Image (cartoon, rainbow, N blue to C red):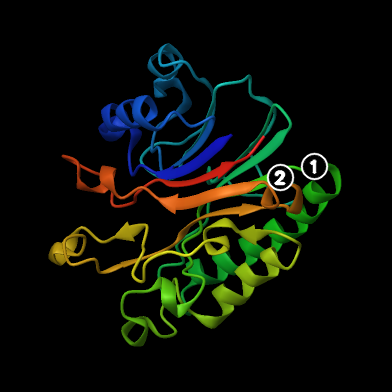
Amino acid sequence: MKIASWNVNSLKVRLPQVLEWLGQARPDILGLQETKLTDENFPAAEIEAAGYHVAYSGQKTYNGVAVLAREPVTDVVTDIPGFEDHQRRVLAATVGSTRFVNLYVPNGKAVGDEKYDYKLAWLAHLREWLATELETHDELAVVGDFNIAPEDRDVHDPEAWHEQVLCSTPEREALAALTALGLSDSFRRFDHPEGTFSWWDYRMNNFRRNRGLRIDLILTAPRLTERLSASYVDRDPRGWERPSDHAPVVAEFTP
């Protein structure tokens, strides 16, 4: 099994890249973030023609999440239970025996901003919900754009980013609270070259200079973690024409 996550930063713009990558990588399940499309404008027919079932939850201009899968998508949830939020940031679904939770975590804007406070509250409610999901789903994968670099080694310049949004201590503690539930950062189960990132700002030739952050994650429950055979960032699509500022992240599992 191969699962993946990709913040596409507008599916309307990036649909050709997504279809090309699906044809090349052939993931069994793919979570997309920042689709930026209302549901009536979602390109379901094109994705289904590529051989994928799809579920989606979107809004105009901002946010938006989708799950693409080779098997039928069932038991769909589009909100964190008990947390009232009009922003479309969550889509959980069952695909075969896998419970797949796809997230677009709030950015937070800046430490101390009201959007930062919203981010921390969102993550606290997320933890409560994931604790219940783990009670009922042995094969749970939580993927997405977390907008948090877990450690300094996930940051091109830790000194410049010290205690800034995406790298602040409260954000990292909130992420650690998720992994403390029993979820593993699949990427860190393997050795990778120093400076492996998943997001590079469009400005200042940051991708060419590899000035990025690793903020796109695949977290796995123990039953999936023990079957992990690979976990990596696929940098290639970041170098394509009109790319997203994120690259897909992938995890592979033995049967």
- Residue placed at 51% from the left, 71% from the top? 150
Which image quarter is the N terminus in? top right
Q: Residue at x 18, y 41 (%)?
A: 242
Q: Is residue 241 left or right of residue 167?
A: left
Pointers 1 and 2 in contact (C-beta within 8 Å): yes
Residue type highlighted by circle 1: His
Residue 165 vertical placement versus 181 (above, below): below
Horizontal and vertical percent for residue 16? 27, 27
Relative image position of residue 82 (x, y in whole percent): 76, 50
Q: Quadrant of the C terminus?
A: top right
114 or 21: nearer the eye?
21
Q: From the viewer's perspective, tell me whether residue 201 is left or right of residue 98.
A: left
Calculate the distance from the C-alpha at mark 1 to the C-alpha at mark 2: 6 Å
Q: Residue at x 54, y 29 (%)?
A: 28
- Residue 140 - label: 2
- Relative placement, left or right, of 38 versus 251 is left
Check residue 137 in the rendering and tell me which mark sits there, or answer none. 1
